[in-house]
Amino acid sequence: MGNAPHIWFLVVYFAAVLALVAVMIGASFVLGQRHMARSTVLPFESGMLPVADARLRFPIQFYLVAMLFVIFDLESVFIYAWAIAIRPSGWNGYLAMLGFIGLLLAALAYLWRIGALEWGPIPRVLPLPRSGKVS
């Protein structure tokens, strides 16, 4: 029963949050717009009406590069955390980070080698003629 007062604070907090959300939703329902004109439902961004559909089809390379950016950006957070604690980690931490960076560079080289970072059209390789004669 020693933790019972702390639980009541949590219950009161959640009740206050739910009451605040209910008041906000209720106020927007009471004070909100009632008309549904054609111009009310049109999307309006940056002072311009849309001229085309907003659902564009992006090439798969866009998503691939975005995922690779997120992955390598997350790895930079690990490197930054290691740089903050470089002295306490000592030589073991240094060697571990050296291996980690080496693994990242190997992964980047592999992605570069297979063409995962290419955005342009795929170059076509034309077959060479077997002999000097044109048939």
Image (cartoon, grey):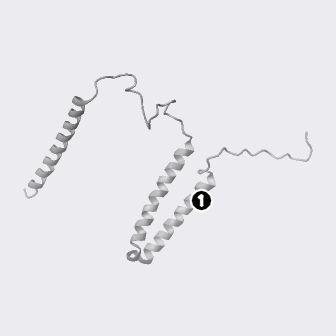
Crowding at mark 1 (Cα within 10 Å: few <14, some 14-19, many 20+): few
Residue in the image at 43% along x and 63% along y: 78
The structure residue drawn at horizontal position 55% and vertical position 63%, both measured from the top left corner, is 105
On screen, residue 15 versus residue 109, left or right, reads: left
Q: Secondary structure at mark 1?
A: helix
Which quadrant does the C terminus fall into? top right
Q: Is residue 134 or residue 57 the one in the foreground?
A: 57
Callout count: 1
Q: Residue furthest right?
A: 133
The image position of residue 53, as x and y in percent, is 50, 30
At 50% across and 49% down in the image, what residue appears? 66
Which quadrant of the structure image shows residue 87?
bottom left
The picture quadrant where one finds residue 30 is top left
Provide residue 94's location: percent of width, then percent of height: 46, 74
Residue underneath mark 1: 109
Above or below 72: residue 132: above
> x, y (%) of residue 89?
40, 74
Q: Is residue 47 left or right of residue 131?
A: left
Quadrant of the drawing holding the N terminus: bottom left
Front one among 99 and 20: 20
Q: From the viewer's perspective, is residue 19 above or below residue 99?
A: above
Residue displayed at 56% across by 40% down: 59
Residue 3 vs residue 54: left or right? left
The amino acid beneath tag 1 is: Ala
Residue closest to the eye, 98 or 82: 82
The x and y percentages for residue 84 are: 39, 70
Q: Residue furthest left?
A: 1
